[in-house]
Amino acid sequence: MGPIARIITIVAGLAGGTVFSQAPEFAQQYRQRIGGAIDELRVIVEDFNRQATEHHLDRQQALNTYAQSSDDFLRDRGVSMQSTITRYETLLSQQLHLGTAAPVAKPFVLLRNADDVVFANTWRDFVPGVPVSFAGLVWGAIGFVSSSVVAALLGLCARRASRRRRGVRQAS
């Protein structure tokens, strides 16, 4: 590998390491946003449960009452409430999984079942962090190695293609 190829490989590795090292920080910021979303959804779900109880219904009976209504608005409101409850429970589950995962694994947990709204808002407001944690260093190393390998392979393919072109020109 020539000196220019080495420099390109190192630069690609550093760039990849820098980008990948942010994965744990992004997971942390995502987890914080989930907490805020859960807090807000909890107010709505608990209020719904309380109102159902006041009318001697459990949650499912209250949702069924909405679903059986002859009024389109009430049926739609029941569907909306069921969607809110499902999202709340999904976020609670994801928060639990993020909380119990090893720091290095948190980005994988996040990607497995990310909430679209929370993910988009986290991405929009993401502030990179300095990867001084063990997880940040591991992800930085993964990014460095994988980016270096990709750059080296691309360089190798480019050199081979260049040699083939030169060989074809010389044969003509």
Image (cartoon, grey):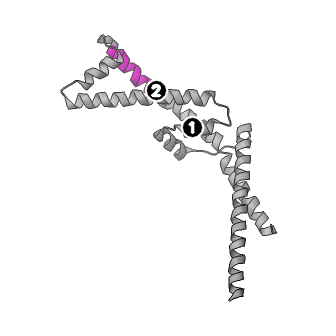
Q: Nearer the viewer, residue 170 or 155?
A: 170
Q: Nearer the viewer, residue 76 or 43?
A: 76
- Give the left or right position of residue 171, taking residue 81 as reference: right
- Residue 75 visible at all: yes
Q: Element type at marker 1?
A: helix
Residue sitting at x 52%, y 32%: 34
The amino acid on which the numbered mark 2 sits, given as a three-letter code, is: Glu
Residue sitting at x 41%, y 19%: 46
Residue 149's disc number: none
Please, which residue is most extreme toward the front here? 171
User: Label 1 belongs to which residue?
Assistant: 110
The amino acid on which the numbered mark 1 sits, given as a three-letter code, is: Leu
Q: Is residue 148 above or below residue 171?
A: above
- Give the left or right position of residue 8, taking residue 44 as reference: right
Q: Which residues are magenta?
A: 39-52
Q: Is residue 1 above or below residue 145?
A: below
Question: CA–CA distance between discs 1 and 2?
Answer: 16 Å
Q: Nearer the viewer, residue 11 or 157?
A: 157
**Residue 88 is a magenta residue:** no
Residue 130: name its quadrant. Answer: top right
Residue 79 image position (x, y, % from top left): 31, 30
Mark toward the start of the polypeptide (1 vs 2) = 2
Residue 63 image position (x, y, % from top left): 31, 22
- Give the left or right position of residue 48, taking residue 42 as reference: left
Residue sitting at x 47%, y 30%: 90
User: Label 2 belongs to which residue?
Assistant: 89
Q: Is residue 106 above or below residue 57?
A: below
Residue 38 image position (x, y, % from top left): 48, 28
Total of numbered circles in the picture?
Answer: 2
